[in-house]
Image: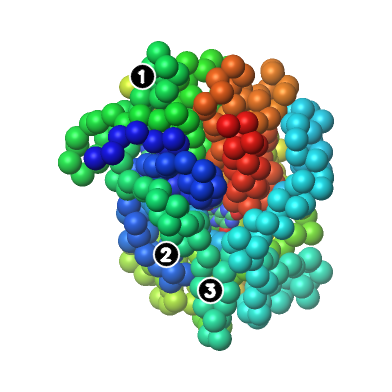
Amino acid sequence: MNKHYDFIIVGSGPCGLLSASLLSSIGKCLVVEQGKKIKQEENNTYTYDHIYNAYVGNGFNLAFGLPPVILSEGRVIGGGSTVNSSLHHRAPNHIWDLWREKYLLKGFNKDKVNEGYKRIEETFCTNFGNLEPSIFYKSAIINGEKVERIPRWGKENNKGILNRCTAAKIFINKIKSNNGFINESTKFLKAYRDRNNNWVVLLKNILTKEKYSVFCKNLVLALGAGYTPSALYDLGLRHKKLGKFEIHPTARISLYYPQYKKPISVVEPFQITGHFPYLMIGSSANKTSLSESNYPFRENKHNIDYSKVQNFYSMSPSNKKGRIVMRGFLKNTKFYFLDYKTKLFIKKGLKIIINIAQKSNCEYIYHAGMIINKKNLENKKMVNSFINSCIQKTLSSVHIMASSSIGENKLLCPLNSLGKIDGIENLLVIDQSTFPSCPTVNPQATASLLSMLNTKNYMKKL
Ligand SMILES: Cc1cc2nc3c(=O)[nH]c(=O)nc-3n(C[C@H](O)[C@H](O)[C@H](O)COP(=O)(O)OP(=O)(O)OC[C@H]3O[C@@H](n4cnc5c(N)ncnc54)[C@H](O)[C@@H]3O)c2cc1C
């Protein structure tokens, strides 16, 4: 096996693969990924197969707190991009302003950012589709809510199914045609620099359990926001904010509409955006098996046809920090405690969903802890207890970020604006951990943009 590379990129999420597609054009490149390949068409997403084989912890992944937060992170070739809902957002201007003003992020002026997003949108084939909104969103509009159609990565076919444009589909052929390598089922253990300043990288083949070393001139970390901080800690970086992550706290609810067909798309590309940036209401996956697993009882006491259940979320962006343990027996364990204000916004979102459900003649509303029928929706006490238990039982996030932030504010940012540790020229960090703070919207486009611009900055200095 060849052991010497110009670049080793750890993590094959959208950030790692995008970076590798650029770096492989100028040098010999190896991508290492602990996960394996998996099918990635729209109908494969949110299936048992995906959750078990392509999510961290086989789908069982918690940040400990009161209540605990269920986290979803990809562990697969393509990272989160292989398993996600393909919904595209640009981070709003006020967030970029905050990053420039408070975190002193340099080199990302407005024009550069807008140009960068355009490039990302082209690369990921971003499109507004033509799907009709479901009864839920139609009723939301009638009730005065602002509903927006969200663009997705890929194109709908004539049946409305999305041909997904994932990072693996876009970048892997390019990396291979540049003579780059992608090692799946390979875990990065640690790295150190030898006396010539080159990296010795210790890897483990997960299938054979064999450990071995490879060597490179440049090391690129893209393990995702949940894991990059501990890799940096192992490399010797010490900073108060390293491993202090942010999420988009979310609660989920299932609505049973026996008289309507479920939407064609696994995740409906609409959101209620009128309460933004404090609150976002949107669709969770409408998979029959997930709707069944959300039902609070083992037996189907209410005769629910799960194929007619639609799932929604109330999500409130928050700057509350969680903590990743970076060493010892509990390494990479996460702790997160929901703050009071965020909880109030999530509650407000759940009330709005319930109100729309009531207006659109939804038969039952349920989550993993409780079910109520439409007759009881007038009962304020019952609705309140339903909302409180919904947060207790379903608090979750599919977005983890800002755990090794970039910027020139040395108190807040473990890394400089270029995604580097001051003084170490041949190490680059380019994943979602580098967000200065939570972007308030779906993060992949912004993470990809940071990866693209900082990889290009890095290449200029080689
Ligand atoms: C279920 C779900 C739905 C989502 N929906 C959306 C959406 O609709 N729109 C949106 O914008 N965003 C969405 N996201 C978020 C989006 O997927 C992330 O923004 C994106 O994946 C972040 O990319 P990344 O490269 O930083 O990290 P990741 O995608 O997390 O990639 C990191 C990779 O590194 C690998 N890795 C970690 N440690 C090691 C190690 N020690 N050795 C080797 N490999 C390692 C992991 O296995 C993983 O594959 C969703 C995420 C999930 C999980």
User: Looking at the image, which residue is at 53% across and 85% down?
Assistant: 159
Q: Amino acid at mark 2?
A: Gln
Which picture quadrant has residue 430? Answer: top right
* Alpha carbon distance from label 3 to label 2: 11 Å
Which picture quadrant has residue 406? Answer: top right
Q: Amino acid at mark 1?
A: Gly
Question: What residue does disc 3 label?
Answer: 162
* Alpha carbon distance from label 2 to label 1: 35 Å
User: Looking at the image, which residue is at 40% across and 30% down?
Assistant: 216
Numbered disc 2: secondary structure: loop
Give neighbour class at mark 3: few <14, some 14-19, many 20+ (Cα, 10 Å). Answer: many
User: Looking at the image, which residue is at 74% across and 31% down?
Assistant: 105
**Which of the two discs, 2 and 1, sits closer to the camera?**
2
Q: Earlier in the sequence, mark 3 or mark 1?
A: 3
Question: What residue does disc 1 label?
Answer: 328
Question: What residue does disc 2 label?
Answer: 40
Please tell me the numbered disc located at residue 214. none
